[in-house]
Image: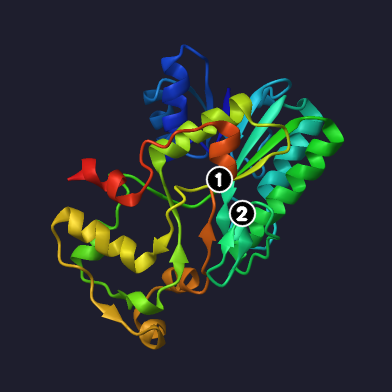
Amino acid sequence: MIILGCGYIGQALAQRYRARGEPVLGVVRSAERATEVERAGARALQRDLAQDDLAPLEPAGQQVFHLAPPPNDSDEDPLTAHLIDAFERHGHPRRLVYIGTTGVYGDCGGAWVDEDWQPRPSVGRSRRRWDAEQRLRRWSQASGAELVILRVAGIYACDRLPLARIRSAQPVVRAEEAPWSNRIHAEDLVTICLAAMERAPAGAVYNVCDGQPSTMTDYFCQVADAAGLPRPPQIPLAEADGQLSAGMLSYLKESRRLSNRRLLDELGVSLRFPDLATGLAPCF
């Protein structure tokens, strides 16, 4: 098993596979990450996936998870392009599961969105992911390698909550003006990744979320309540430009409610944390 971009989720995947006694190669960019991968029980390979020689991957016939984010300096993903070139040179994997983003759908006006919705990414980070999806589809069709695409919503876990932001009383948009957003617990994401590798039909695309959309404001308020902290102050959307970060503002420009019905029906996954309240309960 090869895990490209073996960070937070990749290391959790590695631990699951190692618990089964399966060998895992985790590919990372930094020495610090390599040490973390080794602590997770996997073999680490330090490489810049966007430009280094990738012959040591020995990808031919392997199963590969691609979690590596693209460089953020264009609307294309040169990392995935370089990776595909490496496959052409050194052998194609048998199956690749790409962990992308639901951001490829862009702003959907709060509509319910399934996997048949036409992607229209509106910001650079999502356009790069859409570029990667299209490159990987062309590669899969040309090479015969199996491809599965996971479009992942916002990831949360007990050690990935916005507690510092809440404690500093940074504002959120008023609940009645806040757009819809979607989430998945990290542990459920790992379970879904395993299921996708093991039994998803080749060519499948899945929305990875808990199917219980809410607003970003509701998310911050639920976390604050669970942690016993004051809820963040709420401001009108018209005042957001002067008070919120550029990253947060970009999320406020998109609204969609994601269906996970295909995921549940085809992969037969049972979510351990089917909603935010269940996911937050063990944290405090």
| Residue tagged 1 | 261
Q: Name the element at disc 2.
A: loop
Q: Position of residue 7 (x, y in %)?
A: 45, 39
Q: From the image, which quarter does the N terminus lie in?
A: top right
Place of residue 67 in the rendered image (x, y in percent of width and height, measured from the top left)? 56, 41
| 171 in relation to 29, above or below | below
Q: Is residue 229 visible?
A: yes
Amino acid on which disc 1 is placed: Arg
> In the shown orientation, is residue 147 left or right of residue 30?
right
**In this view of the protein, can residue 67 be seen by the observer?**
no
Q: Residue at x 68, y 22 (%)?
A: 58
**Of 54 and 273, which appears nearest the observer?**
273
Residue 282 position in % (x across, y down): 22, 40
Residue 86 vertical placement versus 249 (above, below): above
The answer to which image quadrant residue 96 occupies is top right
Q: Nearer the viewer, residue 89 or 276?
A: 276
Q: Residue at x 61, y 54 (%)?
A: 114
Q: Residues within 10 Å of mark 1 (few under 14, many from 20)?
A: some
Is tag 1's residue or tag 2's residue first in the polypeptide sequence? 2
Residue where numbered disc 2 is placed: 114
Tell me whether the residue at label 1 lies in contact with that at label 2, contact meaning CB atoms closer than 8 angstroms: yes
144 lies left or right of 81:
right
Which residue is at a point 29% across and 45% down the rendered structure image? 278
Q: Say left or right for 7 vs 53.
A: left
Question: Which residue occupies the extreme top position in the image?
Answer: 21
User: Which amino acid, by three-letter code, is at mark 2?
Assistant: Asp
Screen quadrant of the C terminus? top left
Q: Which quarter of the figure has residue 54?
A: top right
Mark 1 residue element: helix
